Amino acid sequence: MTLTLEDYRYIGTELGRYIAEHVPGIDAAVYCKHHLGTLTPGFSDHDLRSVADAPDAESWLAISRAGGESYVELLEEAPHYARILEHPPGFICSPDEAQQLLPLMGEVRDWERIGGAANELDDVLAAQSAQFTEAQQHEACGKFKIYLVPRAEQFDPPINLLPEYLPYYPVYGALSHWFLPAAKLACGLLRDAWVPTKPAALEVLPEVIGARPLLDRLNAIVDADYRVKMSDEECAGMADELLQIVYELRDRVTAFCQQLPEQDPAQAAREQRLRYALQALAG
């Protein structure tokens, strides 16, 4: 069975509908962590976030519970959605909290609402600057380090994939879970311009490292939705070439990060949020 982006859109719509039906009186929205159009049907799972103005803890719990129940119902209705529905929404916050996180946490820049009620966060995301904040630079420097070794098979195994997608997973995993996120961060930092999607990293990478035949091959693979069969030997050879590029980017990113102020502006905000959480738990 072939999955399409409409399946991903349908799930966002249904999740928003289910929350609205089971938590009346609260305008909740469902955001996709990545731009919906850049997901790869059959390979991508859905990283969703719930955003709502909930007045109390009981309301937050009700929203979270409704999200989980919706996932269970969708899986019972369509077991072939198992990969898309790998986990319920992993993040829940208010529109105000999301706006406070935006200058601190680069992920929020890429959110796209795909279900539920519109809110002011939509306008804020649409109007944001392409430049990094200093806190986002610090965060990106730290995140880049995790991509200095090939990690696809270690941290992102082919769980819940339909059989027809399994032969292509090694190529997809190496690019989408390792190389492209690394290139996205590095190109953004080195150009001081946020790269909005993983495929977009291939468009700007020649500006950073120059044109290379390998980049043409990678573009062809992405254009084919990663459905390119490669032998173990070919995969290993490509991984070596990709690793060399990551090491080139590492040297330039390291030099860039060493120029940043030592104090991360987001650290104080993280500590404050932790204090608030501990106070709330203490009652």
Image (tube, rainbow, N blue to C red):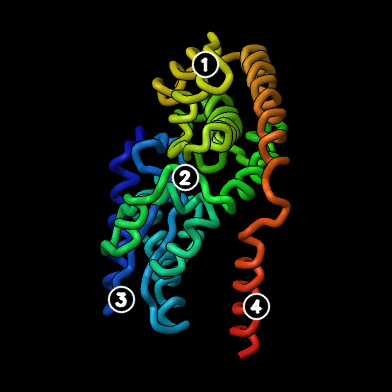
10 Å neighbourhood of mark 4: few (<14), some, or many (≥20)? few
Amino acid type, residue under disc 3 in the picture: Ile
Q: CA distance from mark 3 to mark 4?
A: 27 Å
The reply to whether dot 1 and dot 3 touch (C-beta < 8 Å) is: no
Residue sitting at x 50%, y 61%: 101
User: SS class of the residue under badge 4?
Assistant: helix
User: SS class of the residue under badge 3?
Assistant: loop
10 Å neighbourhood of mark 3: few (<14), some, or many (≥20)? some
- The residue at which mark 4 appears reads as 275
- The residue at which mark 1 appears reads as 215
- The residue at which mark 3 appears reads as 26
Return the residue nearer the eye: 167 or 180: 180
Q: Nearer the viewer, mark 2 or mark 3?
A: 3
- The residue at which mark 2 appears reads as 45
> Does 246 sit above or below residue 277?
above
10 Å neighbourhood of mark 1: few (<14), some, or many (≥20)? some
Q: Nearer the viewer, mark 3 or mark 4?
A: 4
Residue 5 location, x and y as percent?
32, 39
The reply to whether dot 3 and dot 4 touch (C-beta < 8 Å) is: no
User: SS class of the residue under badge 1?
Assistant: helix
Residue sitting at x 63%, y 34%: 152
Q: CA distance from mark 1 to mark 3?
A: 47 Å
Q: CA distance from mark 2 to mark 3?
A: 27 Å
Amino acid type, residue under disc 2 in the picture: Asp
